[in-house]
Amino acid sequence: MFKIFVKNLTLYAYHGVKPEEKREGQYFIFNVQIRIKKESFKDRDNLCETVNYSEAIRIIKEINLKNKFDLMETLAEEIASGISKMSPIISSVKVKVEKINPPLDEKLDSVGVSYKLEVNKEAGFKPASEKNQHQVYLSVGTNEGNKLDNIRKALNLISKLGIVKILEVSSIYETEPMYYKNQNNFYNLVIKAAVKIDVSPFVLLGYLKNIEYEMGRKVQPVKNGPRIIDIDILYIEGLNINSDILKIPHPKLSERNFVIMPLSEVAPDFKINGLNIHDYISKNVFPDKIVKINQPS
């Protein structure tokens, strides 16, 4: 089991019972330990299979900045809770918060609290209500083993996450491999779903990559080669992201017929390059052949 830590992160904030603490503020030191359920990264050197400490720091800074807590205990609990939702592989979060200039007469280095949250994944998360959720589109593909079973299992695992509510699922399409041709045809579909607005896209990515890992996806010796399951985030309503590990909208969406056709079923008003998706399909010729085969069950 691995432990990820953030050591001595110093941030200015306005927490405390005394009025001057909320008015004038002071520096706080944050130390966080995140235990993850991972025994080894040997042969799986992949950021998406762990917890991104940059995202953990973002959560700490956001909670610290947006609130003025009376108690450091509450601040520590909020941070632990926020970080615990980053990934299903997190088993515990320990948060230590210190005031380095407390309003006391005694000579001391700091005062603070320490809080440990044991994560119970069986409890899950409550589904999002309509007013606090993003619409999201996911693509699911497979070309190894029993492809229909792989699709059904992936849909089941996504629905069990607790942070994703599946609204609609496209037909399944059998598609020719687009980039690396020397492999079996794929089965592909697109999911229209809702995700709670307070769930970071990077957290969602972590959950989806964990599903791929649970289903047995291996590191591919060939780029765009065979895989038991592939789950991509195509689009999240209202968001544009350009990072090393996640780009929204998906940068290759407009060239992939195996994504565009099922997407047109669940999102007939979706626009690509300024065109309605059906107009975009009619104006373009795609090299990869696809055939609708089945409605998933």
Image (cartoon, helix red, strand yellow):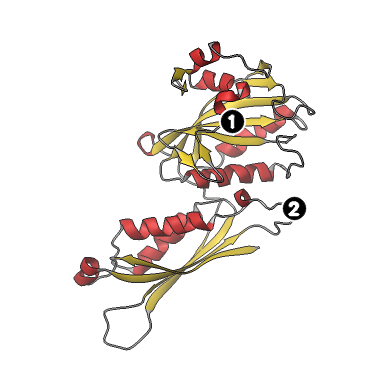
The CA span between labels 2 and 1 is: 26 Å
Front position in the image: 154 or 269: 269
The residue depicted at 57 percent of the width and 47 percent of the height is 206
Looking at the image, is 91 positioned above or below residue 210? below
- Relative to 3, 127 lies left or right: left
Say few, some or many: other residues with alpha carbon within 10 Å of mark 1 (under 14 / 14 to 19 / 20 or more).
Answer: many
Looking at the image, is 36 positioned above or below residue 9? above
Of all residues, the one furthest to the right in this rendering is 182
Q: Earlier in the sequence, mark 2 or mark 1?
A: 2
Residue 25, position in %: x, y? 26, 68
Residue 148, position in %: x, y? 71, 27
Which residue does the numbered mark 2 point to in the structure image? 43
Residue 125, position in %: x, y? 48, 46
Q: Secondary structure at mark 1?
A: strand
Front position in the image: 221 or 120: 221
Mark 1 is on which residue type? Ser
Image quadrant containing the C terminus: top right
Q: Secondary structure at mark 2?
A: loop
Mark 2 is on which residue type? Asp
Q: Quadrant of residue 38?
A: bottom right
The residue depicted at 35 percent of the width and 60 percent of the height is 64
Front position among marks 2 and 1: 2
Q: Quadrant of residue 189?
A: top right
Which residue does the numbered mark 1 point to in the structure image? 139
Front position in the image: 252 or 4: 252
